[in-house]
Amino acid sequence: MDAFYASVELLRYPQLRGQPVVIGGGRRFQPEALADGSLRFARLAEYEGRGVSTTATYEARAQGVNSGMPLARAARLCPQATLLPTDFDEYRRYSRLFKAAVRDIAPTIEDRGIDEIFIDLSAFHGVAVDGGRAIAVAIKDAVHAATGLSCSIGVAPNKLLAKIASELDKPDGLTLLDAGDLAARIWPLPARKINGIGPKAAARLESMGVHSIGELAQLDPTLLVERFGRSYGAWLNDAAHGRDVRPVVTRREPKSMSRETTFERDLHPVGDRETLSALFTDLCERVADDLRRKRYVGRTIGIKLRFDDFSTVTRDQTIEAYTDDAGTIRRAAGLCLKRVTLERRLRLLGVRVGALIPADAQAAAAPPRLPEALSLFD
């Protein structure tokens, strides 16, 4: 999906189309209704805090604003941009709509998150004739009809090349690649365009004089194994030559579900106890909602704390019965919290439920009996 969160917001606020918009502000950045019926939108220049950009419209991206960028830095690059809060409930609703539209046409899909899927088109008649263009156009039209949003599709012999192709002609793109296009379309791209080459690996490759995928393809595979290890080095060589044998996986069982929040300001465990308690409860309720919506239950409850010195602490414990109950999750998370020395201010708090199984695979037993007041935030 193209700039997914931002595009959903533009459906709600069409007056912002064609303007730089950044998604990532807290609830206090909700548009303000004025007496004349118009809306006053917050400007990025007004932002103060430590939040990060969730996404941005292409107009903001042209000014250098990217996903995951600190909003304070984004404000320096594009102060005139409109700042909107995130609304994950709405994004998840549109995610379900676009995926349902695709499944009506091509049911063999691999869910890769809220805004991306892989689709296996190999069984469709005519794909060998037109390279998949007709079916891809039908999918694009169906997604737009169901959501009002555009998507970009890459059609290629495997998942690695399809992922790259989907990024080549955004927004609203359709790119078809075959093995013969590798040298002309893929090799001139920066090596970091390969999904799986992160900043550290890209920096190491650049230190070796490798900047493009084509330059990576020319390296001796033995050298890559020596520099990056047997597994990753061999994968780098395969990826540079467009080789990928991974199938489309139609179902992947999650190992855990979690929710976390980074605070606008550091919060003290004593002075901000009431605020922390409310946030703690909210995180537990949101994780429980995720579990019920996706029909999973779990037994391992954990917490994550990041302090003002950027040190991070995690604690977890396994309870007796599988659960998706918010109260049970909170009580168990509270037990974990008691095992942490809370002397420094906090900048992040998270709650996690692991050891998941499908809810219909085993009926959840009665919640274990835990003391009612275990959280140090209470």
Image (tube, rainbow, N blue to C red):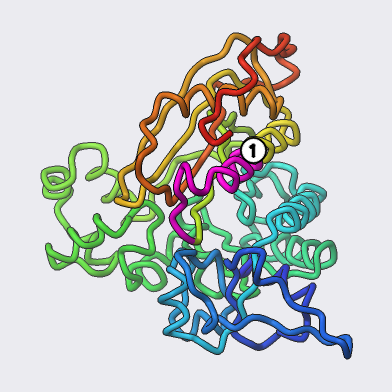
In the image: residue 15, left or right of residue 2 = right
Say which quadrant the N terminus sits in: bottom right
Q: Which residue is mark 1?
A: 281
Residue 154, relative to residue 295: is it above or below? below
Of residues 72 and 241, the one drawn nearer to the viewer in this rendering: 72
Residue 246 percent across, percent down from the top left: 47, 40
- Taking the spot 46% from the left edge, 24% from the top edge, the residue there is 316
Q: Is 268 inside the magenta-drawn segment? A: yes
Locate residue 272, reporting x and y percent.
52, 48
Q: Position of residue 294 (x, y in %)?
A: 71, 34
Label 1: how many Cα within 10 Å (few below 14, some 14–19, many 20+) = some
Q: Which residue is located at x 77 percent, y 53 percent?
A: 93
Q: Which residues are magenta?
A: 265-283
Q: Nearer the viewer, residue 160 or 267?
A: 267
Q: What element does badge 1 sit on?
A: helix
Nearer the observer, 187 or 298: 298
